[in-house]
Amino acid sequence: MRKFSLISLMLLIVSISTFAGGLLTNTNQHAAFLRMLSRGATTEIDAALSNPAGLAFLPNDGFHMSLSIQSAFQTRNIDASCEGLGLNKYYEGKASAPVIPSLFAAYKMGDWTLSGFFGITGGGGKASFDDGLPMFDAMVIGGLGAQNIPSKAYSLKSYMDGKQYIYSVQLGLTYKVTDWLSAFAGGRMNYFTGGYQGALNASAATNLPLPTGGTIPAGTELIGIDLDCSQTGWGFTPVIGLDAKWGKLNIGAKYEFMTNLNIENSTKANSLRMIGAAESELADYKHGVNTPNDIPSMLSIAASYEFLPVLRASVEYHFFDDKSAGMAGGKQKFLTKGTNEYLAGIEWDVTKHLTLSCGGQITDYGLSDNYQSDTSFSCDSYTLGFGAKLNLTARAALNVGYMWTTYEDYTKKSQNYNNTGLSGTNIYSRTNKVFGASINYRF
């Protein structure tokens, strides 16, 4: 095989470092978010994350807490076609997180409120491509084809799994400055843990003649990759917020500073094999190598209004400064802008025990062809959610919610498909469904 094909394969596979994460920071930490989506101006216990300054307006002094459990299921699919390679295949990736826990707590005493939060603020599941990825097939077909080895003369097996979790613990203080204004200052410690497991094997299906003479017997490996790499890292996020409450109107604002986070490899297996060449390693997955994986800064501004004693609505805006956050390979440079999110929600107290709600969110990324890859792609989307809040007692309430996301397919056309020199197209698509329940309790 020519050196060109070997180098191309290595360059493509190292982009897996952002496989399971994508651009989205997990804002859906509570079932109240799932059922309404716009929670940036709330003054209930889930404000410990979404509007911590609003905790100054909790209705009662004392200890408040909430436990939330969510289940999320996603697909990440690629429809690949390259006529020159004879490639026309649909790759389905599945990601699931059956249990996503979050814990919210606050202790209010007069003008002061101490609050805390624990949750998975990034990633949260495992994504698997059982049939590999288009870039694997393209490079093997193209590379072996350059050696006059037709695709029917070898068999190709590959798979790729990626997982990513960012566990976060936040602590902070809220102070009620005046009867209508409060402020928050705190910080969040983030622990990243993730990993990638994959294998690729292209082996001769028949006896293959060598240009230099002799033959390669059937079953002999032509190309092989084995990867088993775990990654960990730490980062700290300062958080500040303000809340202003005038009668029926409440305005909440929060700013999370960018988190510098490098992840370090702990590698058990890392081999790249090619017939006729010495075994080597994938450079970016060598043991001890560090890779940037910054968490972008985030600005949230929201306003809620009580139109009637039983009817409330909220609107909200988020901005994630993705272009300033370091990514593996400097991928952030290919973004055209940061992420903009627009949210709105409404809730109606049907009775004193039952509240119904719904909401929507539009997410607009700054995507480009150079940013999108088989191992890390995003799609603009809109999200809808609905659910209910049940006041079980004067101190306990149950929130249940369901949301789903509809993604806009992203089509990437290339005149140099995966460095093969041929034209080809990938259509990236995703689905997402989340269900959750949360129990709030005031001691």
Image: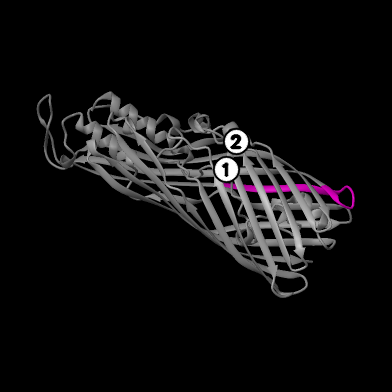
Residue 187 horizontal side relative to residue 195, left or right:
right
Percent position of residue 286, x then y: 44, 32
Q: Residue at x 85, y 49 (%)?
A: 181
Q: Secondary structure at mark 2?
A: loop
Residue bearing mark 2: 261
**What distance separates the C-alpha of mark 2 from that of mark 1?**
8 Å
Closer-to-camera residue (99/336): 336
Verify whether residue 278 appears in magenta. Answer: no
Q: Secondary structure at mark 1?
A: strand
Name the disc covering residue 131, or none: none
Q: Is residue 333 above or below residue 125?
A: above
Magenta span covers which residues? 166-182
Residue bearing mark 1: 192
Quick check: can you spot residue 49?
A: yes
Residue 228 horizontal side relative to residue 315, left or right:
left
Quadrant where the image shows the N terminus: top left
Percent position of residue 308, x then y: 76, 66
Percent position of residue 5, x then y: 29, 28
**Magenta span: helix, strand or loop, mainly?**
strand
Verify whether residue 179 appears in magenta. Answer: yes
Q: Residue at x 70, y 59 (%)?
A: 313
Q: Residue at x 72, y 66 (%)?
A: 311
Quadrant where the image shows the C terminus: bottom right
Quick check: can you spot residue 436?
A: no
* Circle 2 crowding by C-alpha within 10 Å: few under 14, some 14–19, many from 20: many
Labels 2 and 1 touching (C-beta < 8 A): yes
Residue 135 horizontal side relative to residue 2, left or right:
right
